[in-house]
């Protein structure tokens, strides 16, 4: 888009996927592009137990939201991947040039995130942590695909790390979780509007600055 601002629908059922997940020689078909559309960016994921390998709808929704921003000519320079699992969201941002703070309390998952970042050639873009950095620094993009209870508990810590012109992608949500999530975050982000991404019963919410 010429002004670099995404459009303002209240609910987005589907957008063109920006990424494909590659498992060895296999490509996850649900994220592919067809009909001659320029191909999506591949993300290579090694077998492991860390959450976020691209098969779950919430991971797909987060990738759709990040891709939605990128297709709108919005490319963040710094990203916080909170509750990173195997690092897939941070890798998606790093592939477009972002530096990533990757936060995951599970050391085994954090090791998988390191391995996946290396497989995708973006290891140098990552800082791996088990806790949020302190004092807080700000990010143009924050992604958190995790339980509603954790999103609620960390709402203040996440929003205080979001740059004024930054974007926040939250998932791990079902349709019934959305009112509680919005009730918490809208008061903390009065200068942001929200869009909801849907896939089946699952939801992701993108908070974008009001222009």
Image: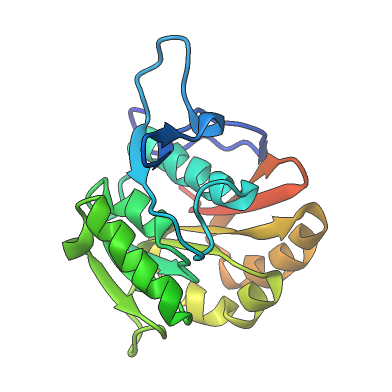
Q: Judge whether residue 161 can be spotted in this image.
A: no
Asked where in the image residue 96 lies, by quadrant, the reply is top left
User: Would residue 141 appear left or right of 123 to someone viewing this image?
Assistant: right
Task: Provide residue 64's location: percent of width, then percent of height.
Answer: 51, 41
What residue is rendered at 48% in x and 80% in y?
Answer: 106
Q: Judge whether residue 61 can be spotted in this image.
A: yes
- Front position in the image: 172 or 86: 86
What residue is rendered at 49% in x and 65% in y?
Answer: 50
- Front position in the image: 84 or 139: 84
**For residue 45, above or below residue 38:** below
- Front position in the image: 85 or 62: 85
Task: Provide residue 60's location: percent of width, then percent of height.
Answer: 55, 44
**For residue 182, above or below residue 184:** above
What residue is rendered at 70% in x and 63% in y?
Answer: 182
What residue is rendered at 48% in x and 45% in y?
Answer: 63
**For residue 128, above or below residue 208:** below
Task: Provide residue 143's location: percent of width, then percent of height.
Answer: 47, 61
Task: Provide residue 129's location: percent of width, then percent of height.
Answer: 35, 81
Query: Which image quarter is the N terminus in?
Result: top left
Q: How is the image coloured?
A: rainbow
User: Would residue 67 appear left or right of 171 to someone viewing this image?
Assistant: left
């Amino acid at each position: 888009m010429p002004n670099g601002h995404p459009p303002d629908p209240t609910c987005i059922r589907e957008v063109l996927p920006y990424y494909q997940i590659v498992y060895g020689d296999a490509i996850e078909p649900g994220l592919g592009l067809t009909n001659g559309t320029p191909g999506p960016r591949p993300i290579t994921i090694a077998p492991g137990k860390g959450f976020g390998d691209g098969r779950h709808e919430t991971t797909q929704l987060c990738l759709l939201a990040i891709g939605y921003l990128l297709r709108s000519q919005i490319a963040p320079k710094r990203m916080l991947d909170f509750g990173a699992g195997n690092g897939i969201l941070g890798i998606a941002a790093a592939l477009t040039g972002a530096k990533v703070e990757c936060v995951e309390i599970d050391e085994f998952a954090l090791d998988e995130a390191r391995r996946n970042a290396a497989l995708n050639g973006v290891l140098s873009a990552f800082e791996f942590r088990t806790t949020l950095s302190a004092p807080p620094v700000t990010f143009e993009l924050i992604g958190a695909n995790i339980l509603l209870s954790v999103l609620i508990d960390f709402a203040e810590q996440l929003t205080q790390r979001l740059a004024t012109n930054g974007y926040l992608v939250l998932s791990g949500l079902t349709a019934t979780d959305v009112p509680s999530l919005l009730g918490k975050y809208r008061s903390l982000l009065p200068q942001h509007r929200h869009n909801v991404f849907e896939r089946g019963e699952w939801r992701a919410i993108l908070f974008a600055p009001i222009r």
